[in-house]
Amino acid sequence: MTVDAPNRMTRRQFVAGTGAAGLVAIAGCTANPNLSANAGGQNSTGCGTKTLSGSVDIAGSSTVFPLAKAVSVEFQKRHQDVRVSLSKTGTGGGFENFFCTGKTDFNNASRPITDGETKQCRSQGVNPLELRVATDALTVIVNKNADWVDCMTVDELRQIWKPGGAKKWSDIRPEWPDVEFDLYGAADTSGTFDYFTHQIVGEEGRQRNDYQATEKDNIVVQGVSGNKHAMGYLGFAYYRQSKEKVKAIAIDNGNSCVKPSIQTAKKGEYQPLSRPLFTYVSEKALAKPQVAEFARFFLKQSANEDVVVDAVGYVPNTDKRVNEELAALEKIVGAQGQDQGQGKQ
């Protein structure tokens, strides 16, 4: 997907009723007094006079996609000569096939990069810089008419999703329907698959294989909404967009049933399925002004509740974290600038 139409997201959707002044603030033009003025570098607010051009190429996580899209659309309003190309490939698929091979500047990720992926990237001259951009409440969904279930324990979910797992609802609780599950979830190239498997099944890469695996979250929603006995899992932003069609399950991690929400994820109450979301940028790509500026812009927007919470549906970064991430980013940008300058001498 190429994000090259600045008006694709309506003003109401993006600003969420904040008005014209809010639109300027979302764009980064009005400085957040809690964000370091020095950390952003020249034109870091997007309000300077520097003209940017060229391309920014992004692949990776479908979970991070809605946030990256919102940021990309607004970035292109500020920098109309920059073309942002954005695609859903899954976290792992993005690292292996696009980012580590140098085909993209950024890789969105719904879990941290692995040692193997880092090794692959570096063997091909790509040094990834991790930027945390939000927190997600990974959500288990069932059909709206599944009136027998509102909360499940982690162990009950494990019984369903482990290799060779339960076949029927009644295998979990005898009073539940004696009907087979219809299951939908992430493909094994997805960071969502990796995180869910690690937290619920407890084994890396080990999940039952008799379910509908997809990188398209709308297929998970469609499947679950179309079968009374279905279950699936996906990022909270996609659930929030479809909450009239499906029902979210509360998770009991040993204390009490906690529903997924912005508030429970922010407070750390929704466990174990609250997770950090990232984008990784190639250090070499930061030598390109448009890539460095997009990285700054993405980080600054990651603290903007109008964008992260209202327009998308994730937990935003704190100002403190953004400042720390910006400082780390500027060190790399400065180093890349020095290397580039020395190369020209």
Image: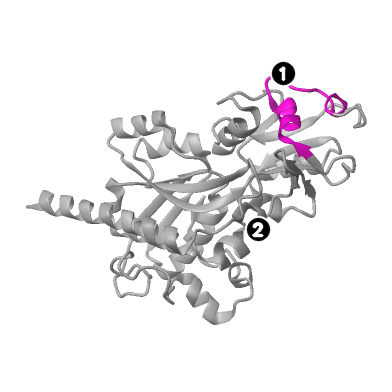
Identify which residue is drawn at 67% across, 35% down.
185
Picture quarter containing residue 201? top right
x and y percentages locating residue 285 in the rendered image: 30, 49
Residues in magenta?
A: 152-172
Asked whether 259 or 210 is in front, the reply is: 259
Q: Which residue is mark 2?
A: 263
- Quadrant of the rendered structure where residue 298 is? bottom left
Amino acid type shown at disc 1: Gly
Left or right for 22, reference 289: right
Q: CA distance from mark 1 to mark 2?
A: 35 Å
Amino acid identity at mark 2? Gln
Which residue is rendered at x = 20% and y = 55% of the image?
337
Quarter of the image holding residue 313? Answer: bottom right
Q: Is residue 22 left or right of residue 210?
A: left
Mark 1: few/some/many CA within 10 Å (<14, 14-19, 20+):
few
From the top left corner, tell me how far across and down residue 182 is, in percent: 79, 31
Picture coordinates of residue 230 (x, y %)?
A: 80, 36
Measuring 55% from the left and 26% from the top, which residue is drawn there? 204
**What residue is shown with label 1?**
164
> Which residue is located at x 70 percent, y 55 percent?
241
Q: Earlier in the sequence, mark 1 or mark 2?
A: 1
SS class of the residue under badge 1? loop
Magenta highlight on residue 189: no
The answer to whether 263 is drawn above or below residue 191 in the figure is below
Secondary element at image label 2? helix
Q: Position of residue 227 (x, y in %)?
A: 84, 38
Q: Residue furthest left?
A: 345
Question: Is 126 or 167 nearer to us in this picture?
Answer: 167
Question: Alpha-carbon neighbours of circle 2 within 10 Å: few (<14), some, or many (≥20)?
Answer: some
Q: Nearer the viewer, mark 1 or mark 2?
A: 2
